[in-house]
Image (cartoon, rainbow, N blue to C red):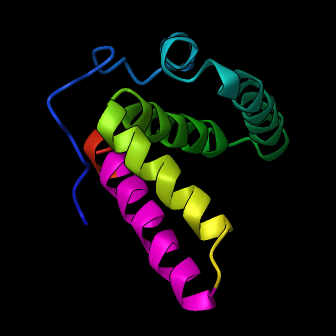
Amino acid sequence: MSQPVHDGVELIPRPERSPAALKAALAVVAADRLPEMIDGQTRAMAEAIATGSVQPIRSFVAHWAAVVEIERHPATAQAYHRANYLANHAGTVQECREHATTVAELYRAAYAAVNA
């Protein structure tokens, strides 16, 4: 499964790649993750200041753009969260690997779609 699981349904249009637009989009598609995003933004800003580099902010935006891309497609989000749950509750290492591979493939596809 190297492609997102799209059923043609999008909860919202793809937002711009800016912290404010991604935060607004996340508030609609996965509001429970806003504290995690805000914490990540704070850490990225602190690291950017400490290192004198904008790379931590770029990485933050790229990651959250991928998260929003997954969450704005209900079928993809369902497949992603199901695989993540099954990976964390697998009975064997092999089952865990299989589900973790699905999680990684869905994330990579979303990341590639919004960070090309």
On screen, residue 71 versus residue 113, left or right, reads right
Is 101 a magenta residue?
yes
Residue extending farthest to the left is 8
Asked if 82 appears above or below 45 in the picture, the reply is: below
On screen, residue 80 versus residue 26, left or right, reads left
Q: How many marks?
A: 0
Q: For residue 48, which quarter of the picture? A: top right
User: Magenta part of the protein: which range?
Assistant: 92-111
Percent of width and height locating residue 89: 67, 68
Percent of width and height locating residue 20: 55, 12
Most common SS among magenta residues: helix
Q: Residue at x 78, y 47 (%)?
A: 51
Toward the viewer: 114 or 99? Answer: 99
Percent of width and height locating residue 109: 30, 54
Q: Residue at x 45, y 51 (%)?
A: 80
Percent of width and height locating residue 7: 17, 36
